[in-house]
Amino acid sequence: MGFFRTDGRRTVRLDDASVTLKAERAPWSLWADGFGRLSIRALQLIVVVIVLAAVILAIQSLTLVTIPLVIALILASAFLPVMNWMRRGGIPSVLATVITLLAIVVILGLLGWLIVWAVRDQWDDLYTQAEEGFQHLLAWIQTLPFDFLQPDQLQEWVDKLTAFVTSAQFGSGALAGVGAVANFVTGLVLMVTILFFFLKDGPQMWEFLLRPFHGSHYLRARRIGDKTTTVLGSYVRGTATVALVDAIGIYIGLVILQVPLAIPLAVLVFLLAFIPIVGATLAGILAALVALVANGWVNALFVVGVVVLVNQLEGNFLQPVLMGRSMKLHPFVILVALTVGTVLGGIVGAVLAVPITAAAWGVIQVWSGPNEPARWARPKSPIES
């Protein structure tokens, strides 16, 4: 004697001997248990890694296009308030674009001219002082109680350097440098062209890209675009202002201490300020080295003190006011972003890594609403945790 049980898919007869006839499980049910869900997550992670590797490979292969494109986007975001102000004032879009573009080119050209002019004007004196400082360094090394550097070793290094300079390998490196200059000019022209269209037709281009989105997806895409341009523009304007204050402060200190090449060093401080943490350190080291060679170690210590004082004033007072909380990133995140950017794009990648990271974090902060971060990025309450 037995009875029947219905499981919703088929009817199974169970006899009195407690013999259970298990229904055949569907193949996809193997993915329903814990190990199956883990396998699905692993496959998803593999797909994400493959896609990310393909994107990085494409970016590295097309740096001549991607880097000018990103730089043009950042500059267009920085000058967007100027463009909007001129448009509201009745200035035609083409004329406003030309004025803004000329202002950008003049600013960048002025920075380059200042460096070249100052270095060329004071190069002979600095070269003489550097040579004298090097001879003093060698003489000091010879007074050390241990055999650190022998004259014959120094002559051997000089001979190797001379042989390298006169070799075909150095000539091929020079040819590679010519190719790098050609790529730089090509990228510069492409960046200026893209920047012109971004300034002139940026809002229309963004609206065209938003056409496939509707409803909540359209609102989210618009929030992402607005937040990206706001963060990038605010980052560039704030960093430029902070860098200008740093450059002026350090320039005044170098002039008071009578350090040569004060103008190019100040310009270098301005440029390196766009690389957070690392840039200020490099600028301080270079300024201290120039002071050491030109005026001695006491003057170099004063230069280090000036650099540290200016950086502390900027970091504790000026930067929090200009940069704001929306672009505040943890130093660990900044270091990781700088490392990744340097590996992928060299110096340019290091400059672009932090604003791109700040923009990505800004997008996460408005993913679910104007002031509502993505669910996984929201701070948890004590009950939830």
Image (tube, rainbow, N blue to C red):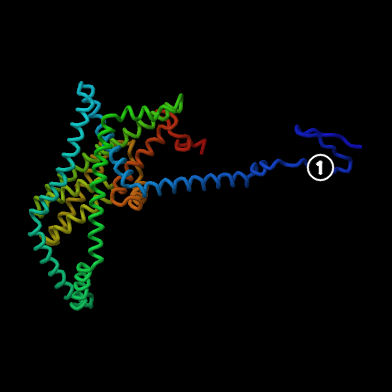
Circle count: 1
Q: Is residue 317 visible?
A: no
Query: Which residue is labeled 1 in the image?
Result: 21
The residue nearer to you, when weighing 134 against 60, is 60
- In the image: residue 327, left or right of residue 142: right
Q: Quadrant of the N terminus?
A: top right
Picture layout, residue 323 above or below residue 263 = above
The secondary element bearing badge 1 is classed as loop
Towards the viewer: 262 or 62: 62
Residue 221: x, y in percent? 41, 30
Please give the name of the residue rendered at 42% of the width and 29% of the height, measured from the top-left corner.
Answer: 220
Q: Amino acid at mark 1?
A: Leu
Q: Position of residue 238 (x, y in %)?
A: 25, 38
Residue 245 seen in the figure: yes
Q: Nearer the viewer, residue 257 or 168?
A: 168
Q: In the image, residue 112 lies at what x, y percent?
A: 16, 47
Q: Could you classify mark 1 by the number of other residues whose Cα lies within 10 Å: few (under 14), some (14-19), or many (20 or more)? A: few
Q: Residue at x 23, y 64 (%)?
A: 170
**Front residue of this view, candidates 13 and 328:** 13
Q: Is residue 226 left or right of residue 381?
A: left
Residue 293, image x, y percentages: 13, 61
Residue lying furthest right in this view?
1
Residue drawn at 16 percent across, 39 percent down: 106
Residue depicted at x 19% and y 70%: 162
Write down the quadrant of residue 229 in the picture. Answer: top left
Where residue 98 sits, quadrant-wise, is top left
For residue 210, above or below residue 58:
above
